[in-house]
């Protein structure tokens, strides 16, 4: 046994590079697998953390729809509180109260002094009958600070806390939070509602099935509306995205780790089989060979697993937190789950051990000549079978993609069909690449020779017979790029969609509202003229509150929502199509949808009217011309009319849309107008995007961190595989040197081979990554956004680092003694 151990150690010392590469490949593979699995655990925690940030500790919201006459009574509250599955209940009353200073009606929430209410509405101070909490924007408008008195309907309240505005969701609403009993009295006075609460916040006991609890509460009153926080559409979308990410990334990581191990073990397995053939020919028994294989593989595997475990621990413990601080990512928990990590490491050890032992142990039983014959096979077999399987897999994938879009069950099973289709496409590509690769390299030969010279021809010609090694390395690079493209495109698409949603609130960089709503006395023309004179304001247009008009047609009259605007200014801002007429008093701009519903076209003359409360009938007000049909109008309007029209005059100022090249300066100048117009509320697209981006990184930070680590570690593994592959060809380069190829030529040959691997792998990876992403995004059809910066950065990093690394390796190989290189067994 000792002699076998000594022989194993001597073989290790003689093949240090091979052993190091094998240990390193196991370490990288272990780290990737551990990171991915621990990531899936932490991703679930991230969603729970996000859910808690949005809704606090509540599990259910119980109440009636506003259009119902039902109210929450003490008996109903008592029934719910006595349910054995309910842990805590908190009453909430929603109303509107009037602020003395602004004479405006503000959305108000009445809450109880408990942790549940505080976690839901994100305030910390306890409230009494004389204290309130308001949002930051409203506090600024009132010039109120903590400790100041705010008068509400002639009653003084002390401001005890100011909470942040929700600017990330668009134009921030104003809100007052007060003690629940006080809000209940205001609801009775202002709204005529005598109810114990508007709705209830409920925490369920641990382990409770929320759907079951919801049904039990529903049985108390069938008209109750019960919202389960876990079923929030945003959370459900995030959960679906999370599942898609975890499933797809898990499969891709499995592919990458398998390819890394195969690529780096090629040389080790070759060497082990070579050594077994020599030893068997010298009289070694199968039992002795088996023991030697076991000793070598256990040492390599154990060291690789331990290093991979340590790397995963360091990345989870330190790198994530470092990335959080550097890029302001999610502050949600990223704990290293030791128990899970140990179980996965042991499982990985067993799988890799079998991977090492099975082919080597089988070789230990057969004759030396047969071992050598198997060892020198370089190509893949069964090319015809691969082509047939490729066609079958592609056919099944196309069927599943079509079925996911047309079958009645697509809502329920569409995502699973697309996931299977995506995996089959990847598998089909991985199977067919060895068949296509030699043809691709042959096609490149003449063109490359003309452009890059004879060294290119020699380099590529040497690659063609070694399809097995070449394919594995190219597939590894492709898998790396698929992970990068899939991850970056999915995240970029989510971020872009979020910003496009915000854009609907911000057709111009700055929006100015009034806090008083319908109570405002602002003159839109006066305010527009004053704002227009500010140095950093380019253009301004104004918008009224919506009014209800009547369109006369063959069937009688059709209701429509109209807004009074300055049509000329809207044209300058490109918010409506250009109008050819100069007199806009009787002009009308309608939305495309409204025009389609009522068969309206540009240039058509129509009759418009208003309903008269006094006469209890519709009165025709005048004749208007449809000057333009716009794809979409702002704020849900069906039509625009000019403020100067003679017939529609009752609407009030609602909003200004402001264009500026220097948004920050313009916002500061607008803030200065609050002394003159204290009711105005200023919002900017730039600030909303900033807040939304911050929330995006908080929500998806762990995804970004894991994908970045996966890409970086896989890249290191790829370079290790390439170095391993180049190292195994030292004898070929020595032969080229005996034929007169200079060291510079050897370096050029090596760089050509490496660059060819990388470029082909990157190109195929980008195409497959985009195809995979497009297939998966068919779940929610729409445009997807390619993150060119990330993709370009990875390409440049791969090419730059490979050039530096393999220039050094080429110089080292070219400087070795030719006779020693030719006689040594370095495959």
Image (cartoon, rainbow, N blue to C red):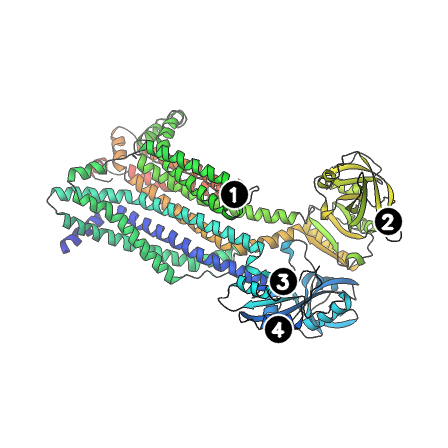
Residue carrying label 3: 222
Residue at coordinates 12% horizontally, 47% vertically from top-left?
Answer: 285
Classed neighbour count for the residue bearing mark 4: other residues with Cα under 10 Å, few (<14), some (14–19), many (≥20): few
Residue at coordinates 89% horizontally, 51% vertically from top-left?
Answer: 615
In the displayed structure, would residue 437 be above or below residue 809? above
Of residues 538 and 333, the one nearer the viewer is 333
Distance between mark 2 and mark 1 Cα atoms = 62 Å
Q: Residue 617 carries which label?
A: 2
User: Which comes before the other along the chain, label 2 or label 1?
Assistant: 2
Distance between mark 2 and mark 3 Cα atoms = 39 Å
Q: Is residue 547 left or right of residue 217?
A: right
Residue 780 image-quadrant placement = top right
Say if mark 3 contacts mark 1, CB within 8 Å: no
Residue lying at the far left in this picture: please name it. Answer: 283
Distance between mark 3 and mark 4 Cα atoms = 17 Å
The residue tagged with tag 1: helix, strand or loop? helix
Classed neighbour count for the residue bearing mark 2: other residues with Cα under 10 Å, few (<14), some (14–19), many (≥20): few
Q: Which mark is residue 260?
A: none
In the displayed structure, would residue 136 be above or below residue 248? below
Residue at coordinates 79% horizontally, 50% vertically from top-left?
Answer: 547
Quadrant in the picture for the N terminus:
bottom left
User: Which comes before the other along the chain, label 2 or label 3?
Assistant: 3
Classed neighbour count for the residue bearing mark 3: other residues with Cα under 10 Å, few (<14), some (14–19), many (≥20): few
The residue tagged with tag 2: helix, strand or loop? strand
Residue carrying label 1: 789
Distance between mark 2 and mark 4 Cα atoms = 49 Å
Position of residue 47 measured from the top left corner of the image (x, y, whole percent) = 51, 58
The residue tagged with tag 3: helix, strand or loop? loop
Residue carrying label 4: 78
Q: In this view, does 217 lie to the left or right of 564?
A: left
Distance between mark 4 and mark 1 Cα atoms = 58 Å
């Amino acid at each position: 046994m000792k002699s076998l151990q000594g022989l194993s150690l001597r073989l290790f010392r003689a093949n240090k590079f091979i052993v190091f590469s094998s240990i390193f490949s196991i370490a990288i593979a272990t780290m990737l697998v551990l990171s991915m699995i621990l990531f899936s655990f932490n991703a679930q925690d991230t969603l729970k953390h996000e859910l808690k940030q949005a809704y606090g500790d509540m599990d259910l919201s119980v109440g009636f729809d506003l259009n119902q006459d039902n109210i929450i009574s003490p008996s109903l509250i008592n029934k719910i509180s006595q349910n054995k599955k309910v842990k805590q209940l908190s009453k909430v009353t929603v109303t509107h109260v009037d602020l003395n200073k602004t004479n405006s009606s503000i959305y108000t929430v009445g809450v109880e002094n408990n942790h549940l209410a505080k976690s839901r509405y994100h305030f910390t101070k306890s409230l009494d009958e004389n204290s309130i909490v308001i949002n930051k924007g409203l506090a600024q408008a009132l010039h109120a600070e903590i400790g100041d008195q705010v008068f509400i309907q002639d009653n003084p309240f002390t401001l005890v806390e100011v909470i942040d505005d929700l600017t990330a969701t668009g134009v921030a609403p104003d809100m007052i939070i007060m003690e629940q009993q006080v809000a209940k009295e205001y609801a009775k006075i202002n709204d005529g509602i005598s109810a114990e609460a508007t709705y209830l916040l409920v925490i369920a006991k641990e382990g409770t099935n929320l759907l079951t609890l919801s049904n039990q509460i529903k049985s108390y009153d069938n008209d109750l509306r019960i919202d389960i926080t876990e079923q929030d559409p945003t959370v459900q979308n995030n959960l679906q995205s999370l599942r898609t990410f975890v499933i797809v990334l898990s499969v891709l990581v499995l592919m990458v780790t398998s390819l890394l191990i195969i690529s780096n073990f090629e040389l080790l397995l070759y060497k082990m089989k070579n050594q077994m053939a020599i030893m068997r020919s010298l009289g070694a028994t199968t039992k002795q060979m088996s023991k030697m294989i076991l000793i070598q593989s256990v040492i390599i595997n154990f060291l690789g697993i331990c290093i991979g475990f340590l790397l995963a621990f360091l990345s989870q413990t330190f790198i994530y937190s470092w990335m959080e601080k550097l890029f302001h990512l999610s502050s949600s928990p990223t704990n290293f789950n030791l128990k899970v990590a140990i179980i996965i490491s042991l499982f990985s050890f067993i799988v890799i051990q079998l991977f090492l032992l099975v082919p080597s142990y089988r070789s230990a039983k057969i004759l030396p000549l047969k071992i050598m014959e198997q060892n020198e096979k370089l190509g893949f077999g069964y090319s015809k079978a691969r082509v047939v399987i490729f066609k079958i897999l592609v056919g099944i994938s196309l069927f599943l993609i079509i079925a996911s879009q047309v079958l009645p069950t697509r809502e329920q099973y569409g995502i699973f069909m697309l996931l299977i289709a995506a995996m089959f496409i990847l598998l089909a590509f991985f199977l067919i690449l060895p068949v296509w690769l030699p043809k691709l390299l042959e096609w490149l030969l003449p063109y490359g020779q003309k452009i890059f010279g004879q060294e290119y021809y020699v380099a590529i010609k040497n690659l063609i017979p070694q399809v097995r090694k070449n394919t594995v390395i190219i597939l590894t690079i492709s898998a790396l790029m698929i992970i990068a493209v899939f991850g970056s495109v999915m995240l970029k698409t989510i971020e872009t969609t979020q910003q496009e949603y915000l854009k609907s609130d911000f057709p111009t960089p700055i929006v100015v509202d009034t806090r008083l709503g319908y109570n405002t006395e602002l003159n839109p023309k006066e305010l527009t003229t004053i704002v227009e004179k500010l140095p950093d304001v380019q253009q301004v247009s104004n918008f009224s509150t919506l009014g209800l008009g009547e369109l006369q047609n063959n069937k009688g009259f059709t209701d429509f929502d109209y807004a009074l605007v300055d049509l000329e200014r809207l044209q300058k801002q490109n918010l409506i199509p250009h109008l050819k007429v100069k007199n806009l008093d009787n002009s009308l701009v309608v939305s495309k949808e409204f025009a389609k519903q009522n068969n309206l076209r540009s240039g058509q003359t129509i009759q418009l009217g208003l309903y008269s409360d006094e006469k209890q009938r519709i009165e025709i007000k005048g004749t208007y011309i449809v000057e333009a049909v716009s794809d979409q109008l702002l704020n849900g309007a069906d039509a625009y009319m000019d403020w100067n029209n003679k017939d529609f005059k009752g609407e009030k100022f609602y909003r200004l849309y402001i264009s500026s090249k220097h948004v920050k300066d313009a916002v500061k100048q607008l803030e200065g107008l609050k002394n003159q117009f204290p009711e105005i509320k200023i919002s900017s697209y730039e600030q909303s995007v900033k807040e939304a981006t911050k929330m995006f990184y908080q929500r998806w930070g762990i995804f970004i961190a894991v994908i970045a680590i996966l890409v970086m570690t896989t890249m290191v593994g790829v370079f290790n595989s390439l170095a391993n592959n180049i190292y195994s060809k030292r004898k070929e380069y020595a032969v080229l040197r005996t034929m007169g190829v200079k060291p510079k030529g050897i370096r050029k040959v090596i760089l050509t081979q490496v660059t060819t691997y990388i470029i082909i792998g990157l190109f195929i990876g980008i195409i497959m990554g985009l195809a995979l992403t497009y297939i998966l995004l068919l779940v929610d059809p729409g445009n997807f956004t390619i993150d060119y910066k990330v993709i370009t950065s990875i390409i440049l990093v791969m090419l730059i680092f490979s050039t530096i690394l393999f220039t050094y390796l080429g110089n080292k190989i070219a400087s070795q003694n030719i006779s020693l290189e030719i006689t040594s067994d370095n495959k």
